[in-house]
Image (cartoon, helix red, strand yellow):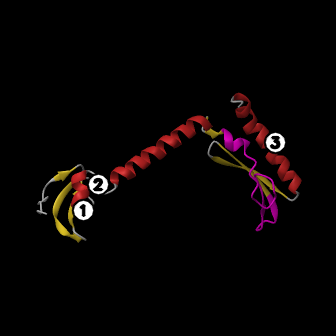
């Protein structure tokens, strides 16, 4: 088989710089991608169009897919800078077993807080866990209920 010199030829985003070596019977070519990366590729993969870039096309497509999925998720789940699904979530992975209430080892008191519109709102320290839970429940009514009522789903 006759060797074809691919030096300085452009294949999609790849420009062949020089012959690099061999992989079995195939010649490897050192290429520079339009994004600036260097990559070694078999001549067949260049000529057939199987390899079009150093991988930057795939990475960009993945980023765009993720952005699009995130955008759709945000449009569906966020209103007024607030995640409706998070307001409804009943996640309780803390020392009290109640969302937004934790034990403060340093002060030896129960701390209550709530997250709303990307802010953490401190609700106080309490010696009695039930007082902390009640403070959290009041805050949920004050902050969450109007949004949940407005965007009932």
Farthest residue in the top direction?
150
Q: In this image, 139 relative to 61: left or right? A: right
Classify mark 3: residues with Cα within 10 Å, few (<14), some (14-19) or many (20+): few
Mark nearest the camera among 3 and 2 is 2
State which quadrant residue 96 falls in.
Answer: bottom right
Quadrant in the picture for the C terminus: top right
Q: Which residue is mark 3?
A: 138
Asked whether the beta carbons under mark 1 and mark 2 sit within 8 Å of each other, the answer is: yes
**How far across and down, in percent of the image, does residue 18 sit?**
15, 64
Q: Which residue is mark 2?
A: 51
Task: Identify the secondary structure beneath mark 2.
Answer: loop
Quadrant in the picture for the N terminus: bottom left
Which is nearer the N-term, disc 3 or disc 2? Answer: 2
Q: Which residues are magenta?
A: 84-110
125 in relation to 135, above or below:
below
Tell me which residue sits at (21%, 64%) in the image.
30
Q: CA distance from mark 1 to mark 2?
A: 9 Å
In magenta segment, residue 76: no
Q: Which residue is mark 1?
A: 42
Tell me which residue sits at (21%, 70%) in the image.
22
Q: Depth check: give the residue in front, 43 or 37.
A: 43
């Amino acid at each position: 088989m006759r060797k074809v010199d691919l030096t300085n030829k452009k294949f999609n985003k790849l420009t062949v710089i020089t012959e690099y070596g061999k992989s079995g019977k195939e010649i490897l070519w050192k290429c520079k991608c339009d994004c600036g990366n260097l990559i070694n590729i078999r001549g067949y993969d260049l000529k057939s169009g199987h390899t079009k870039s150093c991988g930057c096309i795939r990475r960009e497509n993945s980023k765009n897919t993720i952005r699009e999925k995130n955008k759709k998720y945000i449009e569906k789940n966020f209103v007024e800078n607030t995640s409706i699904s998070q307001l409804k979530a009943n996640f309780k992975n803390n020392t009290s077993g109640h969302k937004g209430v934790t034990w403060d080892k340093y002060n030896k008191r129960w701390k209550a807080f709530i997250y709303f519109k990307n802010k953490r709102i401190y609700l106080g320290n309490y010696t009695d866990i039930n007082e902390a839970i009640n403070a959290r429940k009041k805050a949920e009514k004050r902050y969450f209920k109007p949004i949940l009522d407005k965007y009932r789903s």
